[in-house]
Image (spheres, rainbow, N blue to C red):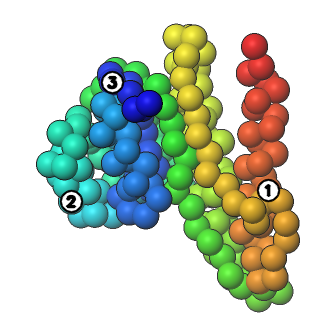
Amino acid sequence: MELSLSGKVAIVTGGSRGIGRGIATAMAAAGAKVMITSRNEETCAATVEELRSSTGGDLAYVAGHVGKTEDMQRVLDATLEAFGAIDVLVNNAGVETVDMAAVIDPVDVRTATRVNLEAPMVLTRYALPGMLERGRGHIVYLSSIAGSYGFPSMATYCATKAGINGFVAALRLELKG
């Protein structure tokens, strides 16, 4: 069975490379209108052009940092302006930390927390009301086994992924039915 997302609108954070790019590619190929966001304007633009050529899809991008609230709001506003609604939100952007808790730079702790935990929660807060109003929508969160188990030199990363796992578990209960 082939996946069809014809006419659906999706946002993919961290969509210009890696897993996010793969997700954006698959969604565009399945007919979704895809808004890609990542920090690098040039990479976003190149990814969108390449995906338009290879998939024939309707794509757009907003360069911005998901760790900045004003950038997240711009992503949502641009998506609504370009495509009219949000049917799928893919919270893919992430930052991995590999320093022990005793020596990690506090700036890295804040960045990882904002990108891995706060951004998906805030983007959900922005996207969810429209989905509830329309009675449909999907929100995807990429996490890690590190959210369930501790790994040495990854305490900050593990904590942010555990936080997302807890957020998703509570959200599932809030939206049940």
Q: Nearer the viewer, residue 74 or 173?
A: 173
Q: Position of residue 49 (x, y in %)?
A: 17, 52
Mark 3 and mark 1: Cα distance apart in space: 34 Å
The kind of residue tagged 2 is Ala
User: Do tag 2 and tag 1 residues touch (Cβ < 8 Å)?
Assistant: no
Q: Where does the N terminus fall, quadrant-wise? A: top left
Question: Residue 6 got which mark?
Answer: 3
- Judge depth for marks 2 and 3 and give the one in front: 3
**Label 1 amino acid?**
Ala
* Residue at point 37%, 44% (across, down): 26
Mark 3 neighbour density, 10 Å: few (under 14) some (14–19) many (20 or more) = some
Residue that carries the numbered disc 2 in the rendered image = 46
**Quadrant housing the C terminus:** top right
Q: Residue furthest bottom?
A: 103
Residue 143 figure quarter: bottom right
Question: What element does badge 3 sit on?
Answer: loop
Closest to the observer, 31 or 95: 31
Say which quarter of the image contains residue 30. top left
In the image, residue 134 lies at what x, y percent?
A: 52, 11
Q: Indicate which disc, 2 or 3, sits on the residue closer to the N terminus.
A: 3
Foreground pick, 25 / 85: 25
Residue for badge 1: 162
Is disc 2 surrounded by few (<14), some (14 to 19) or many (20+) residues within 10 Å?
few
Quick check: 10 left or right of 92?
left
- Residue 46, compared with residue 3, is above or below; it is below
